[in-house]
Image: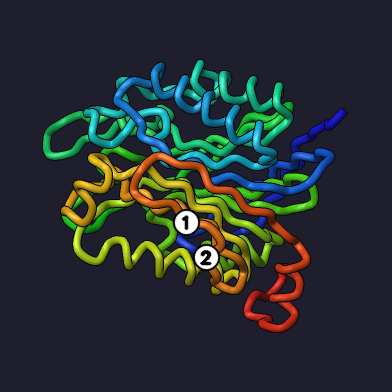
Amino acid sequence: MPFSLMDIAVRRYGHRGSLWITRFRFITLGGMKVAAVQLTSTGNVTENQEIALAKIREAAGNGARLIVLPEATSQNFRSGRLDEQAQSLEGPFATAIQALAEELEVTVVAGMFCPADTVERDGKTINRVSNTALIAGPGVLGGYDKIHTYDAFDYRESDTVLAGESLVAFDVDDLVVGAATCYDIRFPEQFKELASQGAQLIVVPTSWADGPGKLEQWRLLTAARALDSTSYIVAAGQSRPGGDAEAGNPSGPTGIGHSTIVDPNGVRVAEAGYEDDIHYAEIDPNEVAKTRRTLPVVTPAD
């Protein structure tokens, strides 16, 4: 039977002050196939929970050991206030996913929102949330809180979302996996630091904005972060609302599709279109080791 434990290790990371890296360890038996799940979240957490559970079952049934769902899987960004449906990691959304991950003996990463703090903005009291990548596996329930809030292109995520302060990595089978979320992908230091701590694959749950040049930026950034970190990138995004018919039209951060899996050499080995889909790839740790020998751009931590 697979078994698991949680192993905490901390190390300072020099960005936005003193951040910490937290390590969750999942030890299981078997191969290493990953799935990038592209879906369309609704504004209802209960509905999204059922959508997520169905996709997880499908991916696990196709042999995936690590299953990555998009940012905002629990509630999409176009459905109003996030604090009204935010849940802790002990709430029904996270625990239902953890229970299924336990049953299927897989590891799942899925975007959700957790209650965070209360701030004043322009005379208004705002209950902020954490933009959390839930990490659930047999016997383990944890998360990564998005560090770089999307304060760009006339959008201020920090008004409603508290920025995280900790890098997170976890082990699945013999692979070390780092976590990032959406806008984090514009910050190469985070990916390089995760790689220096041993990450061979970095998951990126995403809800990307559409508009002129946005798809090209997404494709460039996912390949660049793979090259920066000489790691696999598994980026699972929200589908484009309206699908192909709306592709390219300006939008907020509500999804552009194009979930992707990129190898350590920046080669795209899988990519979705604008609609709901699941893409798979076999991850080879030896490819990471080979790339890092021939292209030693990552300095291992002491």
Residue at 33% x, 66% y: name it: 217
199 above or below 267?
above
Q: In what quadrant of the picture does the N terminus appear?
A: top right
Badge 2 amino acid: Arg
- Coloured how? rainbow
Residue assigned mark 2: 268
Residue 87 position in % (x across, y down): 44, 22
* Residue positioned 84% across, 39% down in the render: 29
- The residue nearer to you, when weighing 261 against 140, is 261
Total number of numbered discs in the rendering: 2
Q: Nearer the viewer, residue 72 or 273?
A: 273
Mark 1 crowd level (few <14, some 14–19, many ≥20, 10 Å Cα) = some
Q: Nearer the viewer, residue 252 or 85?
A: 252
Please give left or right for residue 286 compared with residue 37 in the image: right
In-image side of 294 versus 224 (left or right): right
Toward the left, the furthest residue is 123
State yes or no: discs 2 and 1 in contact (Cβ < 8 Å): yes
Task: Pinpoint residue 72: horizontal percent, then vertical percent.
Answer: 39, 36
Residue 241: image quadrant is top left
| Figure check: 264 above or below 45 | below
* Secondary structure type for disc 2: strand
Instruction: Give the amino acid at mark 1.
Output: Glu
Mark 2 packing: few (<14 Cα in 10 Å), some, or many (20+)?
some
Location of the C terminus (image quadrant): bottom right
Q: Which mark is residue 271?
A: 1
Marks 2/1: CA distance?
7 Å
Residue 199, position in %: x, y? 67, 59
Q: Residue at x 12, y 34 (%)?
A: 123
